[in-house]
Structure formats: structure tokens, C-alpha cells
């Protein structure tokens, strides 16, 4: 498929560890022209343009960005905030890291346009603690932008005042959940809040707040510069529009971040990523990060967009595509994911705290050869009790892979139970990594 990258345009082909695009090169390439144009528009016009583009959030839930921006009360005399979610903690996801590492001003420009559109004079970029180099890159880009008059008292000399700060987290999956992130930003333990009220009404420091993912915001300058119709013309249909970054990892020859129109299939991604590792056969794949349901190999032709994946019983999520070949023990893989969710559950809600832990215990015993008849049904019943019963979607994140294993790959569970061991000949020493 021939496709000209948009989001990775300036950074495609850069050597790993190469310095990021600086403000000079960014401006020479048309950078900050979207912001300049936005400042000549009325804020409401910008929101309408983003709505018309069909841009949906790239952080996981796929909520329409323009609609979210329109929820910010216009008349409120309270301060307003934009919090950019750079927590990127979904296992398998590393696209925001690449965007920050290679082209940080693209993100700053998207943030600035959003702030102007919703009337927010302050933007926080909340970044996971492990992203040390990326936080430094952002801080340096922000300094450049202040010096160049892109940020500060009068953005591009047009009188709009905007401050931007990087806030580093301490490394917790739950701090990627938007209200857990706000708690952490305010200096408390990262535990999700009761919703409603949603952050657009009561967000950071009690004020109306927009929260958007890094990739979502990186799309915004291009929408303003090239127009909503251009953006809406990319993708599968009017509900699934624009360029998309897919992170492909697992059993492929060339893992990495690949940009395609939203709706690329796994087959297309595999072709770009040099095919299956060592030419082995595909067994299953996760299309949207650790919280997405596993799909069998025969779904590799499916357009990977929000709606087609939802119809197939999974989700696009953070578009972290994990490829598993015939040597993979799916029980062990999902056990490992359940262990992650149990570790990362903040423990506030009983169905999440208990359900994630029981998921890892039951899957662990099956993989170790101590599974009991009826364990597959037990997993399905447990996940039914976890779904939609907690304050945030972390419990549902665990449900995705666990339920799909029990429903779509039940023979693999039964084989473990019946033979009292993992049946795969390729099995590595379980205890080493369990
Ligand atoms: C447990 C959990 C972890 C999450 N982690 C992230 C994350 O690391 N990055 C992110 O952008 N969104 C994450 N989200 C989604 C955010 O809550 C929120 O929906 C998103 O940042 C909104 O931005 P968007 O509309 O641009 O996608 C997470 C959600 C949950 C439930």
C-alpha cells in the first residue's frame, strides 16, 4: 500500500536515538502554520473543524475529540486546563514515545491549538516516570517555544497567553486513566475518581479540563492546516478517519511503529513489518494493546479501526498490535497479562481488586498443570462480574484478554487441564518468567 506519512512525516527514516526535530527545522517545514491559522479563527470554528474531521481519541476509548472540546463550559470564570496524556502505559504501546522523541513541536502545536480553542491558558503534559529522555526532550522543546514567542505572554504575538509544563508521573498504569492522572497531577495517589462529574466540568484543580492523548493532539495541526475534509477523506469511513500509528510487536521480523490510514489490516502491517518472525505461522493477535480481546489468525484481513474491531469482539484501543505465532502458549501469555493487571489495580473497587487477582490465580494454575474441569467457565463467570462494575475501565481491561481466551481459544485451556501440563513442545521454563 502506498501511503505518505503525516504524523511521522518529519521523522520517518531517522536513525534510532537521532536528535528530535528542532524548532527551526519544524518551522522550515511548515510547522506552527496550523497554530498561526488557528489564531485567526474563532475558537468555536476550530472546535467545529475538529468535529467535522471525525478525529477520535487515540488513547484508547476513541471518543470524538471535537465533541469533547465542546463540553468545556464557555461562560465559566474558572481557569481551564488541557492535560495531555503521555502516560503511555498500555503494554505493547510505544507510539507516543516516538512522536515525542522525534517531533516534539508537533505535539506542542496540537496542544496550543486545543488550548486556544477551549480557552485554556495552561497545559500540562503528564508523562510516565520511565520516559526520562522523552520528558527532557519535551522540556527542551518547550524552552525553545518560549524563546521563539510560540508560548508565553502572547502566542505568536496574537495576545493569547499560554503556559506549558511537563509533569512526570512515578510509573503506574492507573495514572494513564484520566481521573487517576488528575489525582496524581494534583499530588495525590493515582486513584480514579467517581464519574460524573467528568473532567470537562470538574477536572484538574476543580476546573474544566480537556484530556487528550499525545497522538490525538498531534493530528490537530494537520486538520487545521489542511482542513477537516482532507482528514475525513483518510480511513475506512466517516466514523473512522485520519492517519493512525500502529505499534507492532511480538513475532514479526521488524517490530516498530507504522503509520497507515486508520483501518489497515494485520496483513498489511505484517507486510510492512517484514512478515512473521522466521516465517512461522500466525496463531493469534491482540489488535489494541493488553486490554483488547485476542483474535484468531483468520481475522488478519479485518480493517483495524474502531468499529470493525468492536464488531469482531475486540477493540482498536491504543493500536498496539501484538503478534503471536504457533509457538506461543496463549494461556501463559494471558496469565502474564492478568498478572500485570492484578499488579496495577489500584485496589479501590472490589470487582477489580479481586477479579484481576483471581484471573491470575486461575490462569496460573491452569498453565502450571493444576487446572480443574470447569475453569474455563469459571473465567467467563468471573469476567462477567468484573465488567462495568468498577469506577474505571482497568477491570474491563483485564476482562478483554481473559474472556477472549476462555471463549475463542477454549480448546487450548482444555488441553492444559486434560494433560496436566502446557501441551506446547516449545514451552520455555515457566517458573523463569512467571
Ligand atoms: C487503566 C487505564 C489506563 C489508561 N492509560 C492510558 C494511557 O496510558 N494513555 C492514554 O492516552 N490514555 C489512557 N487511558 C485512556 C484515558 O483514560 C483517556 O480516555 C484518554 O487519555 C483520553 O484521550 P483521547 O480521547 O485523546 O484518547 C487509560 C484508561 C484506563 C482505564
Image (cartoon, rainbow, N blue to C red):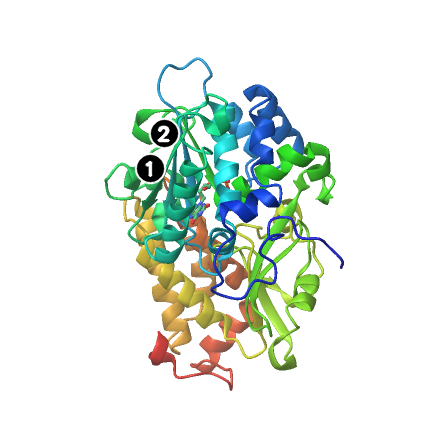
* Residue 286, percent from left and from top: 55, 61
Viewer-side residue, 83 vs 112 = 112
What SS does tag 1 mark? helix
Q: Is residue 420 left or right of residue 264?
A: left
State whether label 2 is within 8 Å of ligand 1. no
* Residue 241, percent from left and from top: 67, 41
Viewer-side residue, 16 vs 85 = 16
Reading the image, the residue beneath label 2 is 203
Q: Is residue 73 left or right of residue 173?
A: right
Q: Is residue 109 above or below residue 158?
A: below
Q: Residues within 10 Å of mark 1 (few under 14, many from 20)?
A: many
Q: Residue furthest bottom?
A: 425
Quadrant, the N terminus: bottom right
Precedes in sequence: disc 2 or disc 1: 1
Say if mark 2 contacts mark 1, CB within 8 Å: yes
Quadrant, the C terminus: bottom left
Reading the image, the residue beneath label 1 is 182
Ligand 1 shown in quarter: top left
- At a point 50% along the width and 70% down the height, the residue shown is 330
* Residue 418, percent from left and from top: 47, 78
Viewer-side residue, 365 vs 2 = 2
What SS does tag 2 mark? loop
- At a point 43% along the width and 55% down the height, the residue shown is 398
Amino acid at each position: 500500500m502506498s501511503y505518505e506519512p503525516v504524523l511521522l512525516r518529519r521523522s520517518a527514516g531517522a536513525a534510532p536515538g537521532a536528535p528530535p526535530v528542532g524548532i527551526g527545522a519544524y518551522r522550515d517545514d511548515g510547522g506552527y502554520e496550523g497554530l498561526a491559522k488557528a489564531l485567526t479563527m474563532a475558537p468555536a470554528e476550530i472546535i467545529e473543524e475538529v468535529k467535522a474531521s471525525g478525529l477520535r481519541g487515540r488513547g484508547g476509548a476513541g471518543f470524538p475529540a471535537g465533541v469533547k472540546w465542546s463540553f468545556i463550559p464557555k461562560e465559566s470564570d474558572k481557569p481551564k486546563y488541557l492535560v495531555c496524556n503521555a502516560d503511555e502505559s498500555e503494554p505493547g504501546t510505544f507510539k507516543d514515545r516516538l512522536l515525542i522523541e522525534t517531533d516534539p513541536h508537533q505535539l506542542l502545536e496540537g496542544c496550543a491549538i486545543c488550548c486556544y480553542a477551549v480557552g485554556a491558558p495552561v497545559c500540562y503534559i503528564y508523562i510516565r516516570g520511565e520516559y526520562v529522555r522523552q520528558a527532557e526532550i519535551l522540556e527542551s522543546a518547550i524552552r525553545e517555544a518560549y524563546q521563539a514567542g510560540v508560548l508565553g505572554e502572547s502566542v505568536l504575538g496574537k495576545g493569547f497567553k499560554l503556559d506549558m509544563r511537563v509533569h512526570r508521573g512515578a510509573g503506574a498504569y492507573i495514572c494513564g486513566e484520566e481521573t487517576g492522572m488528575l489525582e496524581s497531577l494534583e499530588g495525590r495517589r493515582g486513584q480514579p475518581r467517581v464519574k460524573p462529574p467528568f473532567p470537562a466540568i470538574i477536572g484538574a484543580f476543580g476546573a474544566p479540563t480537556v484530556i487528550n492523548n499525545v497522538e490525538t493532539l498531534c493530528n490537530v495541526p494537520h486538520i487545521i492546516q489542511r482542513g477537516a475534509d482532507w482528514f475525513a477523506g483518510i480511513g475506512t469511513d466517516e466514523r473512522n478517519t485520519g492517519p493512525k500509528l500502529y505499534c507492532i510487536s511480538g513475532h514479526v521480523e521488524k517490530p516498530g511503529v507504522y503509520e497507515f490510514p486508520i483501518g489497515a489490516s494485520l496483513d498489511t502491517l505484517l507486510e510492512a513489518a517484514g512478515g512473521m518472525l522466521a516465517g512461522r505461522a500466525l496463531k493469534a493477535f491482540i489488535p489494541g494493546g493488553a486490554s483488547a480481546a485476542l483474535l484468531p489468525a483468520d481475522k488478519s484481513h479485518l480493517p483495524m479501526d474502531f468499529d470493525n474491531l468492536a464488531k469482531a469482539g475486540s477493540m482498536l484501543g491504543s493500536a498496539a498490535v501484538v503478534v503471536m505465532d504457533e509457538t506461543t502458549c496463549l494461556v501463559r501469555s494471558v496469565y502474564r497479562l492478568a498478572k500485570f493487571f492484578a499488579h496495577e489495580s489500584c485496589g479501590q473497587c472490589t470487582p477489580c481488586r479481586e477479579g484481576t487477582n483471581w484471573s491470575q490465580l486461575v490462569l496460573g494454575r491452569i498453565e502450571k498443570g493444576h487446572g480443574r474441569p470447569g475453569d474455563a467457565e469459571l473465567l467467563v463467570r468471573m469476567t462477567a462480574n468484573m465488567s462495568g462494575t468498577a469506577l474505571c475501565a482497568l477491570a474491563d481491561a483485564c476482562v478483554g484478554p481473559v474472556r477472549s481466551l476462555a471463549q475463542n481459544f477454549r480448546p487450548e485451556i482444555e488441553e492444559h487441564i486434560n494433560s496436566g501440563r502446557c501441551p506446547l513442545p516449545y514451552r520455555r521454563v515457566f517458573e523463569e518468567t512467571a
